[in-house]
Each structure stands twice: as C-alpha cells, then as structure tokens.
Amino acid sequence: RKLARDTVRIAQRADRRYSGFTCYAALAPHRASNIEDVSYQILLGEKKYFVSTDGGGERQQWFALIREPAGGVDPEPTPENPTPKLNRLREEFAATGSGDQDGNVWDPFALELIEAASEDDIKRRDLYDGAPLLTTLDPRRLLNPWARGPVALCGDAAHPMMPNLGQGGCQSTEDGYRLGEELGTVTHTRQVPVALGKYSRVRVIRTSIVQGFAQLGSDLLVDFDLMMTIPLLGPFFLTMTQLSMPWVLRFLYTPEF
C-alpha cells in the first residue's frame, strides 16, 4: 500500500498523467488455443480491455487493463484467499453465467490465459503517461526539454506512454541512437550539454506525437461504442480514423533518428 501511495505522489510531482487504467500483466507458460490463427488479440469490454500477444517459446504475454482510480491495491494472499489477483480477474473477465459486474460475458480466451498464470506471475501497476512537450513555461525547458547540463533523460523517463501501440521500447531505441549520434560529435566535455540539448529538441516532437496516439488509442478502445452513439460526430470520427490510418501506421513504424 505504501508503494502505491508513493507512486501516486511521485507521479503528481513529476507532472505525469494517470491514464485512468490499472494494469494486470503476466507472461504465461502456455500455448494459446488460437495461436495458429492469431498472434495479437484485443478483447474489448465496458471500462476494460484484454490484450494478448505471442511471447515466443510457447508463452503468451497478456495485459488486462481496467479503468479505475489510481492507488488501488489487491489484498495480501491468505490461507482463505491464496489468489486475490486471480480471483479478481476471474470476476472481471467472467465467461459464464451473468458475466462480469456490468453483465458482460467475455470470450473464454481471456480466462484461458489468466488461468495459465500463477498468482506470483501476475504483476499489477497503475499506468501513467505524460506530455513531453511544453507542460511548463520555464524557458530552460523550451531550450532543453529533457536535458540539464551534463544530464539527460531518455526512454520512459522522458516520454512514458500507454503500452497498446508497443512503442515504448521502440522510441527508447530511437532515443539511444540519436543520443549516440549527438555525443559522437563531442570533442570536449564542455560540449556535452549542447549535444544533450540538441538530442532532446530533435526527439521531443516525434515522441510527443507517438505518445498522443497511444493515449488516444487506449481511451478509444473502451469508449468507441459511446463515441458511435453521438450523431454526426461518431460517423465523422470513424471515417477520419479510417482515412488517416495508413499515414498513422507509416509514421509509427518508420523509425526516425
């Protein structure tokens, strides 16, 4: 509980945005029943969604994202309830009877993967992201978004983002390449701050756009049905999404260093 409270407090001080989702995740030693047909799958529901992907070596990586306030914790295992995380997920993604607490009956595939993981394998964390671009009018931040003197941030420390696009590690790799390129021009230690400042200015715009796509994508996954009920706006948004998707995918999956 202390860790959960500390996480919320640190995120607030770092100007991070709580995404609205807590995430349960595990890498299950299991060969998925549909692995020959589907390697990546998303199951959508009310206030939550379930994502699975082939982890290789007959393992399946899965994420269960549930919309709820930050700072929640699961009960500690007891002799009477040795698997509190598993028990909650069984209720959240119920595939029989009346379904979950909202009356939704889930595809049994979610529970297939959940049951393949042990209680200890399931990790829970609240998901935070943030805007790397200009959340402050501090002129130092305008010149060096992620750098100060001989120190710079990269990866999730600079641009945390939702995991649904699989871009967190990709953008970190691009950061590392650009960082190496800029530091490769340094011939004296006094040039390091200038190189780090240039690295952060070059990278901040692209990562901000990718981060925005990740935020929007996660929110829309659970709000899509609601969006479609809005006259004119819903169909317009769907059409614009379809038209822009080739450009979005090309932007996401074409590395820029």
Image (cartoon, rainbow, N blue to C red):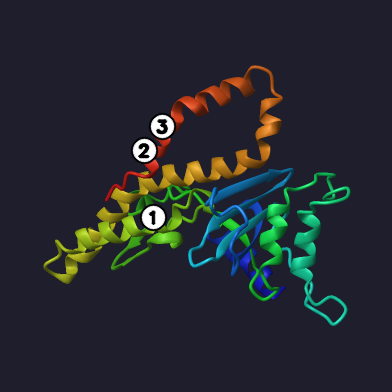
Q: Is residue 24 left or right of residue 152?
A: right
Going 45% across and 56% down the picture, which residue do you hit?
Answer: 168
Image location (x, y in percent) of residue 28: 60, 67
Which label lies toward us, 3 or 1? 3
Q: Quadrant of residue 76?
A: bottom right
Say which amino acid is labelled 3.
Answer: Pro
Residue 170's mark?
1
Assess disc 2: are there few (<14), some (14-19) or many (≥20) residues with their C-alpha within 10 Å of its C-alpha: few
Do the residues under discs 2 and 1 have CB atoms within 8 angstroms? no
**Residue 246 marker:** 3
Q: Which mark is residue 59?
A: none
Q: Is residue 54 visible?
A: yes
Whether residue 82 sits left or right of residue 48 in the image: it is right
- Within the image, what quadrant is residue 64 found in? bottom right
Front-lying residue, 106 or 66: 106
Question: Which mark, by number, is residue 250?
Answer: 2
Cα gap from disc 2 to disc 3, whole angstroms: 6 Å
Which of these two is toward me, 116 or 205? 116
Q: Please state the horizontal and vertical placement of residue 164, each as a whole percent of the image.
A: 54, 50
- Quarter of the image with the N terminus is bottom right
**Amino acid at circle 2:** Arg
| Disc 2 + disc 3, Cβ < 8 Å | yes
The residue positioned farthest toward the bottom in the image shown = 79
Q: Is residue 132 above or below residue 126?
A: above
**Residue found farthest to the top:** 232
Distance of mark 2 from mark 1, alpha carbons? 14 Å
Using the image as rendered, state which of residue 251 and residue 51 is in the foreground: 51
User: Crowdedness of circle 1 by 10 Å Cα count: few (<14), some, many (20+)?
Assistant: some
Type of amino acid under label 1: Cys
Which residue is at the far left? Answer: 187
Is residue 15 something that shows in the picture? no
